[in-house]
Amino acid sequence: MKTVTLFNELKTYSQPVWCDYLFQGEPLRDKIDAHQRTELINGAVKCGNQFADEMRAKYGTVDASQLADKLCKVTHVDVPPIVNQVLLASLTEPNDLKVFDQPIQELVNLELPGFSRHVILNMVMGHELFHFIEGQHPDAFTQTAQIDLWHIGHYHHRSSVTVVSEIAAMAFSWRLNRLSYSPLVLNILLLQKYAPDQVADSVNLLRKLAGRSADSNQ
């Protein structure tokens, strides 16, 4: 598939579809029933949107990259991607944000319409900014949401759900940057560059989830 064709398709998928897509990668998904799953997704999206609205209320229409420079210690590094782990940025608590320039430049080099370095950086910074902000709020939904794995009598063994934070970060970056499509397009476009054999599986999954979503809305 041509990259521009892939990009145009990815832009059509709704936020619920991308939430479902992320949830497919949750290690505990088989232990989460449909009701819990809905609660976790809705809570994560609400958390991400709320923090984005608070940032806009406090700082105005500052770009995510500018906001990151204001709140974090941002450094740019030019290192080759680790095999099977292509990162665009990483946050080390409390506020050390590293941006990996090489994969970002690869995305810029795609020369997709409206997909400038400025837009890409804002998506990347928005995601990491959420993780910074949630770290300052131990009472945030992403920090407190848990599920029961098992229980004996009155004892309940509970666990956090990793994907909750990732869904919230996506929602945060989407809303903060006022995007018309998911910032997760970055992930699939990176696969196109670094792991092209995995692109078809990801796209087919998105198509399947989009079809399921359409059926449930009829």
Image (cartoon, helix red, strand yellow):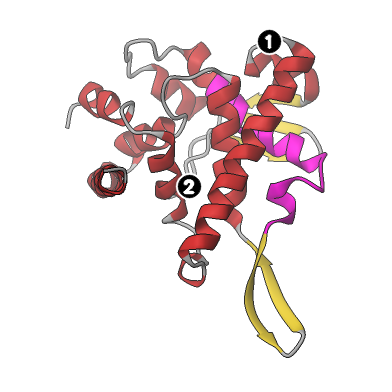
Give how far apart the Cα atoms at labels 1 and 2 are.
30 Å
In the image, is residue 141 part of the stretch drawn in magenta? yes
Q: Residue furthest left?
A: 1
Name the magenta segment's main secondary structure. Answer: helix
Q: Please report whichever mark, 1 or 2, sits nearer to the chain's N-terminal start.
A: 1
Residue 202 versus residue 156 in the image, above or below: above
| Amino acid type of the residue tagged 2 in the rendering | Gln
Residue drawn 47% across the image and 41% down it:
86
Looking at the rendered image, the disc whose residue lies closer to the viewer, 1 or 2, is: 1
| Left or right of 93 in this view: 106 | left
Residue occupied by mark 1? 62
Residue drawn 67% across the image and 68% down it:
159
Using the image as rendered, state which of residue 58 and residue 117 is in the foreground: 58
The image quadrant of residue 127 is: top right
The residue carrying pointer 1 sits among few (fewer than 14), some (14 to 19) or many (20 or more) residues within 10 Å by Cα, namely: some
| Amino acid type of the residue tagged 1 in the rendering | Val
On residue 85, which mark appears?
2
Residue drawn 62% across the image and 31% down it:
49
Dot 2 lies on which element?
A: loop
The image quadrant of residue 71 is: top right
- The stretch of residues the image draws in magenta is 122-145
Using the image as rendered, state which of residue 35 and residue 51 is in the foreground: 35
